[in-house]
Amino acid sequence: METNYQSNVHSSPLLYDIDKDGTREIVLATYNGVVNFFRISGYLMMDKLEVPRRKVRKDWHVGLNSDPVDRSHPDVNDSSIAKQAASEESHPNIQDKSVGDESSKEPQSRSTTNTPQGADPLKHPSELQSSEAKPNPTTEKENPELPKNPKTTTESASHAQRRLLQTADKSDDQTGSAETHGSDAGTTGESTVENDEPLEEEANASFDLFRDAEDLPEEYSYDYDDYVNETWWGDEDWTEQEHEKAEDYVSIDAHILSTPVIADIDNDGVQEMVIAVSYFFDREYYDNAEHLKELGGIDIGKYIASSIVVFNLDTKQVKWTAELDLSTESGKFLAHAYSSPTVVDLDGDGNLDILVGTSYGLFYVLDHHGKTRKNFPLEMAEIHAPIIAADINDDGKIEMVTADVHGNVAAWTAEGDEIWEVHLKSLVPQRPTVGDVNGDGHTDIVVPTVSGNIYVLSGKDGSKVQPFPYRTHGRIMSPVLLVDMSKRGEKTQGLTLATTSFDGYLYLIEGSSGCADVVDIGETSYTMVLADNVDGGDDLDLIVTTMNGNVFCFSTPSPHHPLKEWRSSNQGRNNAAYRHNRQGIYVKHGSRTFRDEEGKHFWVEFEIVDKYRVPYGNQAPYNVTVTLLVPGNYQGDRSIVVSEVYNEPGHKRMQLPTVPVRTTGTVLVEMVDKHGLHFADEYSLTFHVHYFKLLKWLVVLPMLGMFLLLVILRPQEGAPLPSFSRNNID
C-alpha cells in the first residue's frame, strides 16, 4: 500500500474503525489541522476531521509584555527561569499602568465552554480574548486588559448605580406595602365585633377625598400640570456598550504537531479524539504576498496559541474546546503544543482527565469537560515531552512525571503536589519510560536527553540509579524501549534499554550492569525502537525506522511473549510502563493460535497480570472488553462487544458468538484498571472458511459406505455360474 497526501505529518498513525464496517482504518493527523482516514488499501476516505481556527481579538497584545506570565516563582526549583523573570525591567504582566487600572475596576468572566477554570489568571494570557466563536457583547468585561474610554465607563457605572437604586427603592416600597397590608389583614382578622356607631365629625371629614370632586372643598382641587413636568418622563442619558465587529478579530490557522489520543473520556460509550492543537500563521506559507493579503495586513508574529480540541467520533463534530495559552513570537516562551495529551483517571470518578504540557512552560490537567483542575496549571520551562502517568513509587496510586527543555524532571501527585524533582541540565525531547531496570523490585524511570546521556532515576525519590547515566556519542531524540532480552530458560536480571542515537548506532544496554551491545546502522532516527513478533516465529524482533526512509528488523534470542511487545510509543493510549511481569492482559496461546471457528459460540481465554505493587495490592476492578470485528459480507453488527468486570487477576475466559457467514475476524481484548490505564491484545481468526473439507467427506463417505456394504453382503459359499453356451456335452 502506498498513498500520497500533500501535507506534512508530525504525528504517528492510529487505528480506528471510523465507518463501523468491521475494519479499522488508518488515522493520520496532519500539519494543516486535518485528521484523515485511510483504508488498508491506501484509499483516502471522504470522512475527515477539521480543527476550526481559533478566534482572538486583533489587539489582544496591546499594552502587554512579550511574556505576560509572572515566572518569578516557578513550580520547579529552576533558578534560570527565576533569573529571566528578575531581569525584566517592568512588571511581567502589564506595562501600561492605565490599562491595569482600568482592568482592576471591572469583573473578569470566562467562557465555561472553551476556557479552563480555576487557574491563576497570571498563567492564562488566553483570558485576554473572547473564547466564543461569535462576537460577544460582553467582551470588554472578558478582556479587562484592553484599554477603554474612562468617561464612558464612569457614566455607565453611574447610570447602572442609579438604576440599581431605583429598583431597590421600588422593592422597598413594595416590601413596605406588603408588610402594611399584612398587618392590616392581621388586624382585620382579629376583629370579632362590628362597630355600627356613627363616626365623629373629624373622622368623617377625612373621607371627603373619596367623594365627588364637585362636592369637595376648594383646598382639595388641584391642576395636574401645576405639579408634573412632562420632561421628567423623557429618555435617560445613558450609553449602550459598544458592539463587537468581525474586523476586530483574527482567526488563527490550526496545526497539529503531536499524535492525538482516542478514548472514551466521559464514559458515555462514545469514543472521542483528544487533540493538542497549535495555532499560528506559517511563515513559509505567508511569505507569498497573495496569501498574506488575505489577512488584512496584520503582524502574523503576534498570534501564537494552543488549545485542546475534543471530537466526537460518531458525529465527527467538535465536542468542546479548552483554550490554553496565547503568546507572540517576540516572547521567550511560545504557546505551541508539541506534546501529545495523556488521558488517565486521577480522581477515581470513572472519567478520564487530560494531561498536557505546552512550550509556554505550563502543565495543565483538564477534566472530561475541559475545565482546569484545582492547583493547575503548574509552571516549568518549555515542555516538549508528553506527560506520563504511572505508579512510579509502587504505592498503588498514579503519579505524573514531567520533563522540560532545561532538564528539569519532576514527579507530582494527582493533586499537583511535588514528590521530587531532579535537574539533568540537558533538554529532554521525549517522554520517559517506566519499568524495573536493574531487577531490584522497584520501579525506575528512564529519561533520554539531547546531550546523549540516558538517565535512570528511582521512582521513589528521583535519585540516579547506578551505573547510569550511560553516554552515547550523539543526540537521543526518541523514548527508550525497555525489553526483557533474557534467553529461553535463563533467569531474568533486569531489563535491556534499546535506543538509537544520532551517532548512527543502535544501543542495547543491560540495565543491571550498564554494558552495551551496539549495531552500526549508519543512519539517524527520531522514532522509538519497537518490539514485536514480525516473522511469525517464537522469538522477539526489534523494529527500527530511520530518517532515510529505511525500516530495519533485528531478530533477538529472547522468546516472544505478548506482554513483551511494544507496538507504539504509548502502547495504544496511555501506558508508558513495561508490561511483562508487571501489569497487563494477554490472550492465551490456545486461543490466539490460528484456527477456523464453526458452530454457534467460541471461547476467548486470557490472562490478567498485576503483580508488582507490594504490599499495596492490585489495581482492581479490571474492566475487560472483548470486541469481535467482522468485515466482509456479514450483514449483521460488524462490532460484537462483550464486557465483564473482574476483581482479581488471573486466568479468565469469555464466550463470543460465531458469525454464520464465511469471513475473517479480529478479536480485540482490552482492559482498563481503576486508574483508567489501558492495556490491549488482539489476534485474528476465520469463520467457516474451510467448509470445503466437509464437502469432501460428504462425497467420499457415501462411496465408502456402499463399498463396505458390498463387501459385507458378498456370498459366503462358492456357486457355479450359469452357462449360456450351446455346446453342451452330455
Image (cartoon, rainbow, N blue to C red):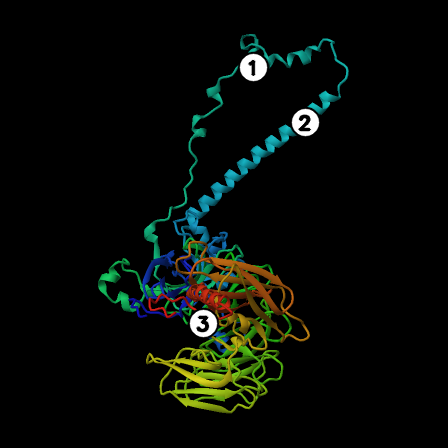
Give the Cα distance between marks 1 and 3.
78 Å
Q: How many marks?
A: 3
Res 540 label: none
Mark 2 vs 3, N-terminal side:
3
Q: Position of residue 523 (x, y in %)?
A: 36, 85
What distance separates the C-alpha of mark 1 from that of mark 2? 30 Å
The residue pinned by badge 3 equals 88
- Decide which of 152, 720 is in the foreground and name it: 720
Q: Quadrant of the C terminus?
A: bottom left
Going 39% across and 52% down the picture, which residue do you hit?
133
Residue at image position (38%, 46%) is 243
Work out whether 124 lies above or below 491: above
Q: Does residue 367 show up?
A: no
Question: Could you tell me if the residues under marks 2 and 3 are in contact, i.e. CB atoms within 8 Å?
Answer: no
Secondary structure beneath dot 1 equals helix
Q: Residue 367 location in percent, x, y?
A: 53, 59
* Quarter of the image that includes the N terminus: bottom left
Mark 2 or 3: in front is 2
Q: Secondary structure at mark 3?
A: loop
**In this picture, residue 314 sits left or right of residue 649:** left
Type of the residue with mark 3: Glu
Q: Which residue is mark 2?
A: 182
Mark seen at residue 220: 1
Question: Residue 592 or 569: which is nearer the viewer?
Answer: 592
